[in-house]
Amino acid sequence: MKSHLLAAAFVAALAMGLAFLAGDAARRPALIGAAIASGTALASLYAFGHFSGGAHRPLQSALVVFGITFLARLLLVGAGVAAVARTGESVIAFVVAFFVPYFAFTAIEGSYVSALGRRMGKPA
């Protein structure tokens, strides 16, 4: 779990840093998108470790966490797009800053869930 969380923290720091370096017109929407992607990813990995680590059925617990996190991301992206569009700022900067790290975070989360499956051993 520690290596997955460290990888996610590195991607989050990189995403926030690159969003901060965006131009003046794109900085705020990019920071919002990167913050939503990073925050939900770190919360998801924490929840994976908390609820799936010692669970009787860790893959089922991980699937529940994955589903809840996906719905939260869906709602937060919608709210973020609406907020950015309402202020007349760059929706494209928001979308790029959210989805580019999102795919990296999804790979990290998938790697963790895959590691959970390997820990379980062979089914009886």
Image (spheres, rainbow, N blue to C red):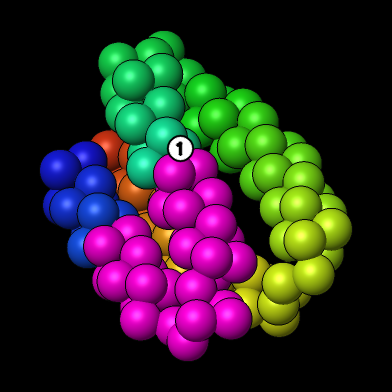
Asked if the stretch drawn in magenta spans residue 106, the answer is no
- 90 and 124: which is toward the camera: 90
Which residue lies at the image location 25% right of the left edge and 54% below the top edge? Answer: 9
What percent of the width, then of the height, locates residue 35? 46, 53
Which residue lies at the image location 33% right of the left edge and 60% below the top edge? Answer: 12
- 70 and 78: which is toward the camera: 78
**Tag 1 secondary structure:** helix
- 26 and 70: which is toward the camera: 26
Asked if the stretch drawn in magenta spans residue 39, the answer is yes
What percent of the width, then of the height, locates residue 73? 66, 45
Residue 76 appears in the picture as rendered = yes
Which residue lies at the image location 35% right of the left edge and 48% below the top edge? Answer: 112
By secondary structure, the bulk of the magenta-drawn segment is best described as helix
| 61 vs 109: above or below | above
What percent of the width, then of the height, locates residue 104? 44, 69
Tell me the quadrant of the picture where the C terminus can be found: top left
Q: Which of the 4 image quadrants contains residue 1? A: top left
Q: Residues within 10 Å of mark 1 (few under 14, many from 20)?
A: many
Which residue lies at the image location 60% right of the left edge and 37% below the top edge? Answer: 69
Residue 114 appears in the picture as rendered = no
What percent of the width, then of the height, locates residue 109? 43, 52
Horizontal side of 79 relative to 3 (left or right) equals right
Q: Amino acid at mark 1?
A: Ser
| 37 vs 63: above or below | below
Residue placed under numbered mark 1 in the picture: 44
Q: Which of the 4 image quadrants contains residue 66? A: top right
Residue interval drawn in magenta: 12-41
| 60 vs 105: above or below | above
